[in-house]
Image (cartoon, rainbow, N blue to C red):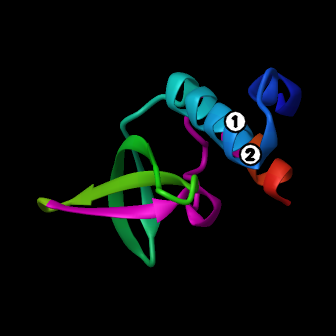
Amino acid sequence: MVEEATVDAYGDDEQAMGFHVMIADNLKIPFVTSVLGVDVTVDHIGLAEDNSILAMCARGGILQAIRVLDLPLPEPPPVGAQWIEAYRHWVG
């Protein structure tokens, strides 16, 4: 999966953008997960200026970006969550 996400990408920034595309295209959203004991809805995936991949989490009209690396996944994980795991492995 790492190879698929980073094909034709040169350098860490382009490779991170490749993972962003694969996660955004393959992760079934929205989904509910728990962050610090509070249920939130992940409603889209974003990219920070430093090329960190972000999960945009919503609750009660409030939107909070959380790095995908720090996002706890629900059990069972949503379809496409294997791309998050591949990204975590790549960053590793």
Q: Quadrant of residue 38?
A: bottom left
Residue furthest out toward the front: 10
Residue in front for this viewpoint, 71 or 34: 71
Q: Which mark is residue 83?
A: 1
User: Are circles 1 and 2 on residues that touch, CB within 8 Å?
Assistant: yes
Identity of the residue drawn at 57% across and 52% down: 51
Instruction: Determine which residue is flagged by label 2.
Output: 87
Residue in front for this viewpoint, 30 or 18: 18
Q: Secondary structure at mark 1?
A: helix
> Residue 53, can we see it?
yes
* Label 2, residues with CA under 10 Å away: few <14, some 14-19, many ≥20: many
Q: From what the image shows, is residue 89 above or below residue 83? A: below
Q: From what the image shows, is residue 75 above or below residue 19? A: below
Magenta stretch, residue numbers: 62-85
Residue in front for this viewpoint, 68 or 72: 68
Answer whether residue 67 is magenta in the image: yes
Give the image location of residue 7, x and y in percent: 81, 22
Q: Is residue 74 left or right of residue 37?
A: right
Identity of the residue drawn at 62% across and 38% down: 17
Q: Secondary structure at mark 2?
A: helix
Identity of the residue drawn at 38% across and 62% down: 65
Q: Is residue 61 left or right of residue 45?
A: left
Give the image location of residue 58, x and y in percent: 26, 56
The Cα–Cα distance between marks 1 and 2, rounded to whole angstroms, is 6 Å
Identity of the residue drawn at 48% across and 54% down: 54
